[in-house]
Image (cartoon, helix red, strand yellow):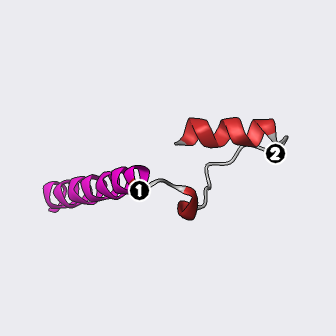
């Protein structure tokens, strides 16, 4: 997703940014992003419990 965003920004002569409009995502990309956030949240929870003293 980021590569496609950067390519579009380069073609338009805009500075590179990692911010994108989620409304422009396909349903498949949206589901993949949601799953990535779920996995990140799960990992954060495990790390938090591991490092509690």
Q: Residue furthest right?
A: 13
Asked where in the image residue 8 lies, by quadrant, the reply is top right
Which range of residues does the magenta coloring cover? 28-53
Is the Cβ of the residue at disc 2 closer than 8 Å to that at disc 1?
no
Residue 23 in percent (x, y) is at 55, 64
Which residue matches tag 2?
14
Residue at the (74%, 43%) spot, across then down: 9
Q: Which residue is mark 1?
A: 27
Q: CA distance from mark 2 to mark 1?
A: 26 Å
Residue 50 appears at what percent x and percent y?
14, 54
Q: Quadrant of residue 4?
A: top right
Query: Is residue 31 covered in magenta?
Result: yes
Judged by depth in the image, the label closer to the viewer, 2 or 1, is 1
In the image: residue 45, left or right of residue 8: left
In-front residue for pair 18/3: 3
Task: Determine crowd level at label 1: few under 14, some 14-19, many 20+ residues with C-alpha closer than 10 A.
Answer: few
Sequence-wise, the earlier of marks 2 and 1 is 2
Please give left or right for residue 6 compared with residue 12 in the image: left
Task: Residue at 51% x, 55% y: name it.
Answer: 25
Q: Is residue 46 magenta?
A: yes
């Amino acid at each position: 997703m980021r590569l496609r965003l950067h390519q579009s920004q380069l073609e338009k002569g805009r500075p590179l940014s990692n911010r994108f409009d989620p409304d422009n995502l396909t349903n498949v990309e949206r589901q993949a992003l949601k799953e990535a956030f779920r996995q990140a949240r799960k990992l954060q929870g495990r790390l938090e419990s591991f490092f509690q003293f």
